[in-house]
Amino acid sequence: MIATNHAYVGDLVRLAGGQNVFASQSQEYMEPNDEAIQKADPQVILRLEHAMPTMVTKQFNQEFKQNAMWSRTSAVKHHRVYDLQEPTFDATANMRVVAALNQVSRWLYPKGAAA
Amino acid sequence: MKQRANWWYGGILGLLLVTIALALMAGTVWLGPRQLSVALSDHGSQAFVTVFSLRVPRILSSLVCGGSLAVAGALFQAVFRNPIADPSILGISSAADFFKLGGAMLLPWLPGREWLMALLGGLVALVILTSGRALADPYRLIIVGVALDATFVGLQQLLSSGATQVSHSTFNGLTWADATTLLVLGVIGLFVALLLAPWANYLKLTDAALKNVGVPVKVIRWSLLLLGMTLATSVTAVVGAIPFVGIVVPNVARRLVGHDYQTLIPFSMLAGAWLMLAADTLGRTVIVPSEISAATMMTIIGGPFVIILLQRGRGLHGMSIR
């Protein structure tokens, strides 16, 4: 499931100066298929460890290992896959938004790299 | 009858080829016949990757799953002498789904876990179905099956509540490894089904008549039932439960090619493969970039079909499976 610009975590990307590859007119979350993700070719992938972090992260890693589609995205090729961890990040907005936004900015535009 | 069946065979084969070609072309990016041939000659191109590693495994998987589910339905209908018996409506598929989820939580180290657990789940559901009085009349069987199905769906939600998403039964994200598993299991199962098709014809006679001729009724019944269960749970193990294919396809097939299981089973296989591929291709192209899962597509197509089938007045007893 992918958070679009209409969801809190999805919109952090825009606030940090990036572009969410799955922008939507009205939907908060969507489930794009493999072809659509491959076509969108994200440069950075942010994975939200929601609800049960250890289990979810394990599933993320397994999915990224098993499904070769991920390894063809720019983000994976350039090792720019990051895990958003609770409590800084959550599916809904909270008081830690400043820290969260700073973190996303650093991931999207690391110091030294051309912005 | 024979002549007409041949025409239908030709028709479904043609339809299959056209749909496979369309499924290769359609997707997030439309690839016309020329781009397709270019893609196949240039192995480094983006188009080749899209077609070969995303579309082809998906097409093969949906073909095998559709064929398996349709044949499983036909076998169940022969054994239970009930025109709407099918592993999904009788709770076999959701039991397999539930056991698969339980296995993932309790025995994550087990090799071949998903298939073994799904098979075990199917077996448990089958034992529950056949042990009581459900076999006494067709209505009771279906009601017990529906209740069993609801129970296992509920248990699955209980087990997964708060933890993970409930599986969606979609062909999205299938890898070549999944497709290969499905192909191996499906092709073996379907081949055995073609060999055993004459047995399904025997079951049209009453048990007493069969015993007089000296046919081992029990052996026949259980082998066909286990075969149908294996076909259906193999699909559940890799993809998830997909409803109605096993009811819609064999019933339409009876109208088209007649009631002889030796023509009915191969025809159901082809028609099921086509229906599944068509439903999945439509599901993944109508709301790009998201998609409608194969299970949802089949529910929308199959639900009304079963309602019409049963509401047309003749009821279970009027509908013949012979």
Image: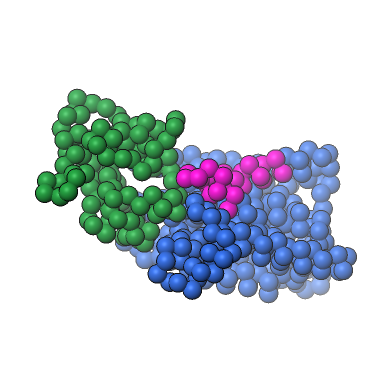
Chain colours: A green, B blue
Q: Position of residue B281 (x, y in %)?
A: 58, 53
Can residue B320 be seen here?
Answer: yes
Q: Is residue B43 left or right of residue A81?
A: right
Task: Tell me which residue sits at (62%, 69%) in the image.
Answer: B190
Q: Does the magenta run of residues contain B104?
A: no
Whole-percent x, y for residue B149 in the image: 56, 44
| Residue pictured at 86% horizontal, 69% vertical | B2
Q: Outermost residue toward the top? A: A95
Q: Is residue B291 magenta?
A: yes
Q: Nearer the viewer, residue B176 or B244?
A: B176
Depth check, front residue: B188 or B81 = B188
Q: Which residues are magenta?
A: B281-306
In percent of width and height, residue A69 lies at 38, 58
In-front residue for pair B284/B312: B284
Task: Report the predominant secondary structure element of the magenta stretch.
Answer: helix
Q: Nearer the viewer, residue B241 or B321?
A: B241
Task: Classify residue B221 as left or right of residue A12.
Answer: right
Q: Is residue B75 left or right of residue A43?
A: right
- State the residue at coordinates (82%, 40%): B312
Q: Say left or right for B97 vs B252.
A: left
In the displayed structure, B140 sits above or below B130; it is above
- Residue furthest to the left: A112
Say whether residue A87 is visible: no
Q: Residue at x 71, y 66 (%)?
A: B13
Q: Quadrant of the C terminus of chain B?
A: bottom right
